[in-house]
Image: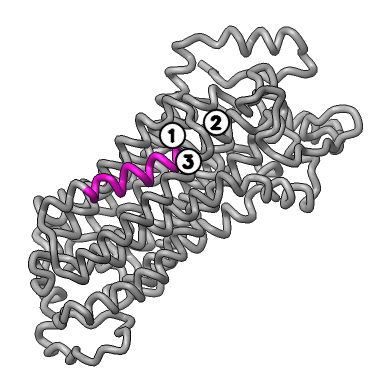
Amino acid sequence: HRPSVAPPGPRGAMASGAAKSTSRSEVAWSVAAFFCLGLLNNTLGVVMNAGASKIDDAAIGVVYMAGNLPTFVVKLTGPYWFHRVSYSIRIWASAVLMVLCLCIVAWGESGSVKLLGVACASLQSGLGESSLLAMASFYDAQMCLAGWSSGTGLAGMFGYFWSIVFTQFIGACFQVELMLGLWIPVAWLLVYHLMLGKPWIDETRVTCSEEGATSEEGGSGGNGVQAFPSDPSASDSESGAVPADQRHQVPVTASLTCGRRLRFTLTLWKFMVPLFLVYASKYTIQAGVWGSMGFPATDPASRDRWYMWANFTCQVGGFISRTLGGLVVLSVPALWAGPALQFLMVGFFVACAMLGIGGWWLLAPALLVGLLGGFVYVQAFVLISHKVDGKYLELALSIASVGCTFGNILSDIVSILAQGCLFGHSHITDTKPAFTCGYDIWQAPPAAAANASAATAARVCFPGVVG
């Protein structure tokens, strides 16, 4: 029922024996829990992106920024305070933020108020992801990271499907779509408490705090603070993998100073830089390039159809690679091959958009974009789980994902610039982009056309709400 692996140390051989006796059924149970938590953690963010035009149609880019900046702050600062807040409290905080997001975005009367709700979803996503990635270090790390990655991959497909069903098939307003999503925080708490349970480190840290043993709160033993290896992949074997009996040790997170944590973070560059590069290029394609493509690109309906199906196909690719990519452990050079290929995909799709070539066959390379992004994500964390010393694994897993979010933020900026230039180059005049790239080909749309979407009421909504 509690599949987390007990730490070696105070209980010596008994704890080590408990680690070895973890049954396959317990591992499968914990992997299933991480899969479900990954799905639930990322679904709200996808729904917010899918409904960005309903949150603030005059500043969709701002909606995306509101969905990334709070996550970035949490991931960047979390490793310096996470050890003071138990995993259980963080899980409950995530659930509260989910409820706040759904209610504020649904019933906020202005775009700025709704953005506050989007920020709540962003805080929840960042807190949940960095916490659960770190929590995987107390279970079968590789398998649980694979389960988590697969769940987050499915969240992309599920979130878009959820939005499409309510908007295109049911004809429901955004408020109905969001209020019926209140099952998500409930399921989040049920999965955590019934399938996973709090990890043993929560009790260990509480005990150390009560005993006043602050110097040993991180389990470093002896003199409290231990020096970390200059290279996180340092080991006794040629492969760079940390021996299995060195994993599942009590982490030294709490006993490291801020300076030591920062220096340790810098040693993870070989994992974080590929994450940054692949996410920056992937979301530049999705948000900046695909939004400027269609067959023909000057037809708004054609652009919308291409954008929807290209993004959905990309999510399918991400789900496939996140599900299968964690079952094997490749090398660090193989990890770096992902962003290199993704940059080629940026050039490929920019060329297609500028030259006006292509067709629905481009869904095949769109699938590849998703495959590359998912592959780098899951492989980066699996490699960390194998190459970083067990005492530092919790810290490493909690901080590495900041590379993804930093890439997202950069892509938001680049996408605004890229979309404006591609709109101007392709003479797309039906919509004026936020950045015009020096072109002067747009005219203000008639007031009636600008308000056409607002005049259309949803078929299913709450009394008195237009939607």
Secondary structure under tag 1 reads helix
Query: What percent of the width, then of the height, locates residue 305?
Result: 12, 59
Report the magenta stretch's main SS: helix
- Residue pointed to by mark 3: 335
Q: Could you tell me which residue is drawn at 40 percent across and 70 percent down?
A: 414
- Which mark is drawn over residue 148? 1
Label 3 and label 1: CA atoms lie apart by 19 Å
Which residue bears the numbered disc 2?
A: 136
Scheme of image coloration: one colour
Relative image position of residue 249 (x, y in whole percent)? 70, 24
Which portion, as a residue range, is magenta? 365-378
Whether residue 132 is visible, yes or no, is no
Instruction: Measure the C-alpha gap from mark 2 to mark 3.
Output: 21 Å
Q: Residue at x 48, y 45 (%)?
A: 336
Residue 402 magenta: no
Question: How many labels, in total?
Answer: 3
Q: Give the residue displayed 12% in from the left and 50% down from the top.
A: 361
The C terminus sits in image quarter? bottom left
Residue type highlighted by circle 2 = Ala
The amino acid beneath tag 1 is Trp
- Judged from the image, the secondary structure of the residue bearing numbered disc 3 is helix
User: Closer to the observer: label 3 or label 1?
Assistant: 3
